[in-house]
Amino acid sequence: MKILIADDHAVVRQGLRLILANEFRQATFGEAQDTNALVEQMKHDQWDVVIMDLSMPGGSGLNTLKEIKHNHPHTPILILSMYPEDQYAVRTLKAGASGYLTKETASEELVNATHKVLRGGKYINASVAEKLLLQLGNEAGRPPHEFLSDREYQVLCMIASGKEVGQIAADLTLSVKTVSTYRARLLEKMNMKTNAELTHYAIENKLVM
């Protein structure tokens, strides 16, 4: 079995590898430190499961996830993120991920999650499952941020985290003009006018840590 671990922190990659190697003793491992390296690894080899961080240098984790699933639709991808489930779990599952774990719970849940996605299942906790059911059954009751595109949502969370437009542009490898356009769109969709309103909303709805 071949497992690819993508995270920009070497100590995290090493820790995940130790946890998995103890369970999957015949497994071989690959590593990627950013989204570009991850995409290249996927091009040059076949992997039984990919475990990837959502926030790495090189570009949007969500966009990278969609690209990988487009080119490798049968490869299960388990997202391991610092962001709480409420922030990105549903979006990553809709983008094709087979499961979502926070780094806080990784040591307890990683092995079970890997087993499940290798069998073709989805790994989500009860709160995420409930959120998915609510979205399916009650379109009118969904909060405004759930109608944002993935990129608009990402910009919202970064603004609420205190980042300026220029910093967001650098982090996402976009132009300042493009980020400003996303900001204008999400303000319009959220019926808000200022970054302060966005920040207050994000904190109130637990979209930022």
Image (tube, rainbow, N blue to C red):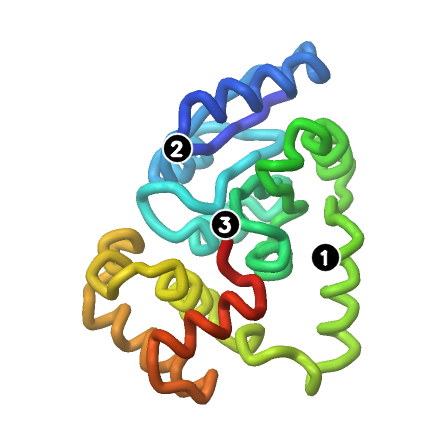
Q: Is residue 77 visible?
A: no
Instruction: Looking at the picture, tell me which residue is in the foreground, 159 or 5.
Output: 159
Label 2 crowd (10 A; few <14 / some 14-19 / many >=20) = some
Of circles 1 and 3, the one toward us is 1
Residue 91's disc is none
Three-letter code, disc 2:
Asp
Three-letter code, disc 3:
Leu
**In the shown orientation, is residue 65 left or right of residue 8?**
right
| First of labels 2, 1 by sequence position | 2
The residue drawn where x is 53% and y is 74% is: 145
**In the shown orientation, is residue 160 left or right of residue 70?**
left
Instruction: Looking at the picture, tell me which residue is in the foreground, 161 or 148.
Output: 161
Percent coordinates x, y for residue 147 in the rendering: 55, 78
Q: Which residue is mark 3?
A: 65
| First of labels 1, 3 by sequence position | 3
The residue drawn where x is 49% and y is 24% is: 13
Disc 3 is placed on an element classified as: helix
Disc 1 is placed on an element classified as: helix
**In the shown orientation, is residue 192 left or right of residue 120?**
left
Label 1 crowd (10 A; few <14 / some 14-19 / many >=20) = some
- Spatial distance from mark 1 to mark 3, Cα to Cα? 19 Å
Label 3 crowd (10 A; few <14 / some 14-19 / many >=20) = many
Specify the quadrant of the image occupied by residue 186.
Answer: bottom left
Of circles 3 and 2, the one toward us is 2
Asked if residue 81 is positioned above or below residue 106 in the image, the reply reads below
Residue 128's disc is 1
- Spatial distance from mark 3 to mark 2, Cα to Cα? 16 Å
Instruction: Looking at the picture, tell me which residue is in the foreground, 192 or 129.
Output: 192
| First of labels 3, 2 by sequence position | 2
**In the shown orientation, is residue 208 left or right of residue 136?**
left
Q: Which residue is mark 2?
A: 8
